[in-house]
Structure formats: C-alpha cells, structure tokens
Amino acid sequence: MKNTEMNGQYSRIEPSTKLTGDIISESDFRIDGILEGSIRTSGKLIIGKEGKIVGKINCENADIEGEVKGNLSVKNNLFLKSSSKIEGEVVIGKLIVESGAHFNANCSMKSEKENQIKSLSKFSKSHEKTA
C-alpha cells in the first residue's frame, strides 16, 4: 500500500531543506527544497516551484514546477508546468508541456506497445513541416 493510500499525504522535503544523498521510496514524494543526489520512487514525484533536483530521477509519474538538472526517467506521464526548467537526459512514456516551460534536454519516448525507446531528437526519414 502506498503512503498516499494510508494517510492522504506525500513524503516531503520542505522548502527550507537541502538534502545530499539518495532517496528510495515506495510512496508519492514532493520536493519543495533542494536534493543533490538521486530519487527513485514507485509513485508520483512532484517538484514544487521552489524545488530543485541535481542528479538522477526514476519514477512512475512526475509533475514539475521547479528545476531538474540530470537524468530523468519517468515510466508514464511527465507534466512540465510553465515555471519548470529541465536540463539533461529524459526518458518518458508521455510528455505534457505547458507554455513557458524551459526544456533543454535529449528526450526519448518509450513506446508502450513495443517496449522500445524511440528517439525524439532526430527524424529517420525526411519529413514535411505542417502548421
């Protein structure tokens, strides 16, 4: 049973907290402070507007308002809010981006049907741009 199913709350790093190290969690997790290291959760990761991660992320789903520098692996949905800043390597299931988000990353999308990774940065055949 996930933490959110037990008490309706996320595990959390508060805005005034800076943590150096690795986090492994089976519950949803919210970061409003700073994490220098890695986080792996089988739940949802939320990075608040003041939150920042420098390191590696591995999670089921992610909602990001803050900043990420490093490797980001999201099995399902990655939702980037308008205030988010992402730099690094990203592997996702689905990507949702609000206008204004800063996304400077190499991005690959994992196909659900084929269970393979498709590169989004290059086209294998010539293509026509349409509006």
Image (tube, rainbow, N blue to C red):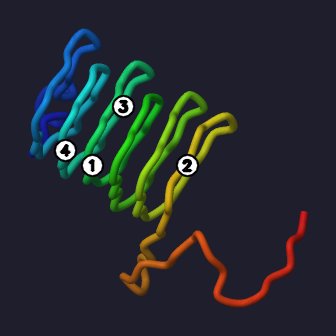
Marks counted in the figure total 4
Secondary structure beneath dot 1 equals strand
Residue on which disc 3 sits: 47
Please tell me which residue is depicted at 67% across the width and 34% down the height of the picture. Answer: 100
Residue 25: image location, x then y, percent: 11, 43
Above/below status of 40 relative to 9: below
- C-alpha separation, residue under disc 1 versus residue under disc 4: 6 Å
- Between 91 and 46, the one nearer to me in the picture: 91
At label 1, the amino acid type is Ile
Q: Residues within 10 Å of mark 1 (few under 14, many from 20)?
A: many
Q: Position of residue 56 (x, y in %)?
A: 26, 49
Q: Earlier in the sequence, mark 3 or mark 2?
A: 3
* The C terminus: image quadrant: bottom right
> Regarding mark 3 in the picture, which secondary structure is present there?
strand
**Residue on which the image places disc 4:** 38
Look at the numbered disc 2 and give the secondary structure of its residue: strand
Q: CA distance from mark 3 to mark 4?
A: 13 Å
Tell me which amino acid carries mark 3: Ile
N-term mark: 1 or 3: 3
Question: What type is the residue that disc 2 sits on?
Answer: Asn
Q: Could you tell me the amino acid type at mark 4?
A: Ser
Instruction: Nearest to the eye among marks 1 and 2: give it.
Output: 2
Q: Within the image, what quadrant is residue 2 found in?
A: top left
Q: Earlier in the sequence, mark 1 or mark 4?
A: 4
**In the displayed image of the protein, which residue is found farthest to the top?**
16
Please report whichever mark, 1 or 2, sits nearer to the chain's N-terminal start. 1
Query: How far apart are the two marked residues, 1 and 2, measured between alpha carbons?
Result: 16 Å
